[in-house]
Image (tube, rainbow, N blue to C red):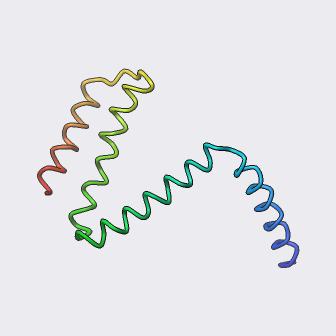
Amino acid sequence: MLAIFLTLVAVSAQTLANYALRDERFVLGVTLLACHFGLWCLALRLAPLTVLIPWTALSHVLNALLARELLQEKIGRRRWAGTLLIASGIVLCN
Protein backbone atom coordinates (compact mmCIF):
# COMPACT_ATOMS: atom_id res chain seq x y z
CA MET A 1 0.00 0.00 0.00
CA LEU A 2 2.81 2.38 0.90
CA ALA A 3 4.65 1.51 -2.33
CA ILE A 4 1.57 2.39 -4.39
CA PHE A 5 1.17 5.69 -2.55
CA LEU A 6 4.84 6.60 -3.01
CA THR A 7 4.67 5.70 -6.70
CA LEU A 8 1.64 7.94 -7.20
CA VAL A 9 3.36 10.78 -5.36
CA ALA A 10 6.51 10.38 -7.49
CA VAL A 11 4.56 10.34 -10.76
CA SER A 12 2.48 13.34 -9.70
CA ALA A 13 5.57 15.26 -8.62
CA GLN A 14 7.32 14.51 -11.90
CA THR A 15 4.31 15.62 -13.94
CA LEU A 16 3.99 18.79 -11.88
CA ALA A 17 7.71 19.51 -12.23
CA ASN A 18 7.57 19.05 -16.02
CA TYR A 19 4.66 21.47 -16.28
CA ALA A 20 6.04 23.98 -13.79
CA LEU A 21 9.46 24.28 -15.41
CA ARG A 22 7.78 25.34 -18.67
CA ASP A 23 5.96 28.20 -16.95
CA GLU A 24 8.24 31.24 -16.64
CA ARG A 25 6.11 32.80 -13.92
CA PHE A 26 6.44 29.69 -11.77
CA VAL A 27 10.21 29.65 -12.18
CA LEU A 28 10.36 33.38 -11.41
CA GLY A 29 8.21 32.89 -8.32
CA VAL A 30 10.36 30.07 -6.99
CA THR A 31 13.51 32.11 -7.69
CA LEU A 32 12.12 35.14 -5.85
CA LEU A 33 11.03 32.94 -2.95
CA ALA A 34 14.55 31.49 -2.70
CA CYS A 35 16.03 35.01 -2.74
CA HIS A 36 13.59 36.07 -0.02
CA PHE A 37 14.60 33.10 2.12
CA GLY A 38 18.29 33.89 1.67
CA LEU A 39 17.80 37.55 2.55
CA TRP A 40 15.71 36.60 5.59
CA CYS A 41 18.47 34.27 6.82
CA LEU A 42 21.02 37.04 6.31
CA ALA A 43 18.83 39.52 8.19
CA LEU A 44 18.50 37.06 11.07
CA ARG A 45 22.28 36.92 11.32
CA LEU A 46 22.55 40.70 11.42
CA ALA A 47 19.66 41.65 13.72
CA PRO A 48 17.61 40.04 16.49
CA LEU A 49 14.23 38.56 15.67
CA THR A 50 12.44 41.08 17.90
CA VAL A 51 13.68 43.85 15.62
CA LEU A 52 12.87 42.05 12.37
CA ILE A 53 9.35 40.80 13.10
CA PRO A 54 7.74 44.28 13.12
CA TRP A 55 9.18 44.85 9.65
CA THR A 56 7.19 41.90 8.35
CA ALA A 57 4.06 43.98 8.99
CA LEU A 58 5.33 46.32 6.30
CA SER A 59 3.89 43.88 3.77
CA HIS A 60 0.41 45.22 4.60
CA VAL A 61 1.55 48.73 3.69
CA LEU A 62 3.16 47.54 0.46
CA ASN A 63 0.07 45.51 -0.45
CA ALA A 64 -2.15 48.57 -0.09
CA LEU A 65 0.16 50.71 -2.20
CA LEU A 66 0.59 48.08 -4.91
CA ALA A 67 -3.14 47.34 -5.01
CA ARG A 68 -3.82 51.01 -5.61
CA GLU A 69 -1.12 51.46 -8.25
CA LEU A 70 -1.18 48.15 -10.12
CA LEU A 71 -4.79 47.03 -9.74
CA GLN A 72 -6.40 50.48 -9.52
CA GLU A 73 -8.27 49.43 -6.39
CA LYS A 74 -10.13 52.06 -4.44
CA ILE A 75 -8.76 52.16 -0.92
CA GLY A 76 -10.96 53.95 1.58
CA ARG A 77 -10.02 56.18 4.49
CA ARG A 78 -10.45 53.39 6.99
CA ARG A 79 -7.95 51.15 5.15
CA TRP A 80 -5.47 54.04 4.83
CA ALA A 81 -5.87 54.76 8.54
CA GLY A 82 -5.07 51.13 9.32
CA THR A 83 -2.08 51.22 7.00
CA LEU A 84 -0.82 54.38 8.70
CA LEU A 85 -1.33 52.74 12.09
CA ILE A 86 0.76 49.75 11.00
CA ALA A 87 3.52 52.00 9.69
CA SER A 88 3.47 53.98 12.95
CA GLY A 89 3.77 50.77 14.93
CA ILE A 90 6.85 49.78 12.94
CA VAL A 91 8.45 53.15 13.68
CA LEU A 92 7.59 52.88 17.38
CA CYS A 93 9.00 49.37 17.69
CA ASN A 94 12.31 50.37 16.15
Q: Quadrant of the C terminus?
A: bottom left
Closer to the camera in the image, 14 or 81:
14
Q: Quadrant of the N terminus?
A: bottom right
Residue at image coords 24%, 56%: 54
Q: Number of labelled discs?
A: 0
* Residue 84 placement: quadrant: top left
Residue at image coords 22%, 67%: 50
* Residue 10 placement: quadrant: bottom right
Residue 89 screen position, x and y as percent: 17, 49
In screen coordinates, is 88 left or right of 59? left
In the picture shown, does residue 27 fall above or below 11?
above
Closer to the camera in the image, 59 or 35:
35
In screen coordinates, is 26 left or right of 73? right
Residue 80 screen position, x and y as percent: 25, 30
Residue at image coords 68%, 44%: 23
* Residue 8 placement: quadrant: bottom right
Residue 24 screen position, x and y as percent: 64, 44
In screen coordinates, is 7 left or right of 33? right
In the picture shown, does residue 68 fall above or below 13?
above
In screen coordinates, is 22 left or right of 55? right
